[in-house]
Amino acid sequence: MRVAVVGATGAVGSTMLGVMRERSFPADEVVPFASERSAGRTIDWGDLDLTVQPLNEDSTQGFDLALFSAGSAVSAEWAPRFADAGTVVVDNSSQWRMHDEVPLVVAEVNPGALEGHRGIVANPNCTTMQTVMALGPILEAAGIERVVMSTYQAVSGTGQRAVEELHRQTQAVIEAQELPAPAVYPHQIAFNVLPQVETFKGGDDYTTEERKCMRETRKILGRDDVGVSATCARVPVYTGHSVSANVQTREPLSPQECRELLAAAPGVTVVDDPANAIYPTAIDAAGRDDVLVGRIRPDPSHERCLNLWIVGDNLRKGAATNAVQVAELLSVRGLLRTARAA
C-alpha cells in the first residue's frame, strides 16, 4: 500500500504520521507532502527519514490512499486530482463534509457509510466527532429527539499560531509585562473565554463552527429529525475540547443505564464519580484516543433528558486518529482496491 500524507508538517498531519506508526499501519511506502516552503524537510519515520515533497501534477500518481490535513483550499483543488488517479482520499478539512456523495465517517459510529464512496471520505469536525461518540450508542438504545451542545474548545484547534498567542499572552500577564495585541483571535484569549469559534458569515448569528456541529451531527447519525443546537466557545487550554451536552431521548434512559451503555461502547471511557472529584478534564484527555464521558445526570426540567460532559483530544481522536481508523477500515474492507480498479 502506497500512502500520501498531505499537510504532513502541520499539527494534525504530524499527528497522523505518529498515529500510523503507533498503530502499525500497513503501509509499504509513506510519502509526506506539504507547501513549497516545507519541501525538502525530513521527517523521522522510525528507521527511515521521509523527505517532504511539494504537490504537483506528477505527485498525484500511484497512491492507494491519501490522508489530507492541509485546509479546505488545498483539499478543494487536490483531493479530486488524487481521486481521479484512483486514490482514496480521507480528508480532514471542512471542504467535503456536507457533500451528499461524500461519506462523513466516525469509525465507531457509522462505518457502513464507507460503502459506495466515490473516492473521497470526509473526517468530521473535531467537536462533532467526540460528541457523536457518546450520542451514537444513546441513539441506538433510546433514540434522540434533541441535543443542545455547549463547547469549550482548546486553542490548538485553531493551529500553532494560536498556541503561541496564548503562551505569549499568558507569560505577559504573569510577568506583568505589556500585553501583546491579539493577532489570531479578535480578543485576548489568556485568562478569558471567547464565545466565538471561527467566523460569522452572511449576517448569520451562528458561527461557522456552530453550523458545522449542527449539520454534521445529523449527517453522521443519519437522522435529519434530530434537533441540534450549538454554542461554541474558545477557552485558554492548549489541547482537549470539552462539551456539555443536554440530550433529550425518545425513550426513557436512566443515568445508570447510560453509564453502562457508554462503558460498553468502543472508543469511549466513562469517568463518572463526581462526589470524589472524578470526572473528565481536558488534561486527562490530552494524548489519549478514547473520548471521556462523565457528569452523567438527569435533567430536572425534563423526564427524558440527560446531561453529559464529554472530553476528547482534538488532535488525536478529533482529527488524526479517526482519519487513520477510517483508512484502516477502507483497507480491511477492500474499499481501496475497488477505487483503484475503477
Image (tube, helix red, strand yellow):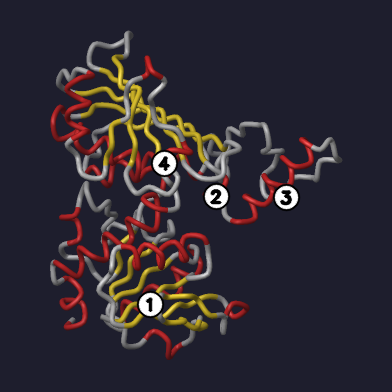
Q: Residues within 10 Å of mark 1 (few under 14, many from 20)?
A: many
Q: Is residue 201 visible?
A: no
Q: CA distance from mark 2 to mark 3?
A: 15 Å
Q: CA distance from mark 1 to mark 2?
A: 24 Å
Would you name the residue on which mark 2 appears? Answer: 156
Estimate the x, y position of residue 91 in percent, counting from the top left: 37, 64
- Give residue 237's position: percent from left, percent from top: 57, 39
Task: Where is residue 340? Give x, y as percent.
Answer: 21, 82
Q: How many numbered discs?
A: 4
Give the quarter of the image for residue 306.
Answer: top left
Question: Residue 92's spot in the image, x, y percent?
Answer: 40, 60
At numbered mark 3, what does the secondary structure look like: helix, strand or loop? loop
In the rendered structure, which disc, 2 or 3, sits on the residue that comes first in sequence? Answer: 2
Q: Secondary structure at mark 2?
A: helix
Q: Residues within 10 Å of mark 2 (few under 14, many from 20)?
A: many
**Residue located 29% across and 25% down the image:** 247
State which quadrant residue 138 falls in.
top left
Query: Label 4: which residue?
Result: 285
Query: Residue at horizontal 37%, vertical 69%?
Result: 67
* The furthest residue to the top: 300
Tell me the amino acid under the disc marked 3.
Ala
Chain-order first, disc 1 or disc 4: 1
Question: Taking 145 as reference, is 56 above or below it?
Answer: below
Question: In which quadrant will I find the N terminus?
Answer: bottom left
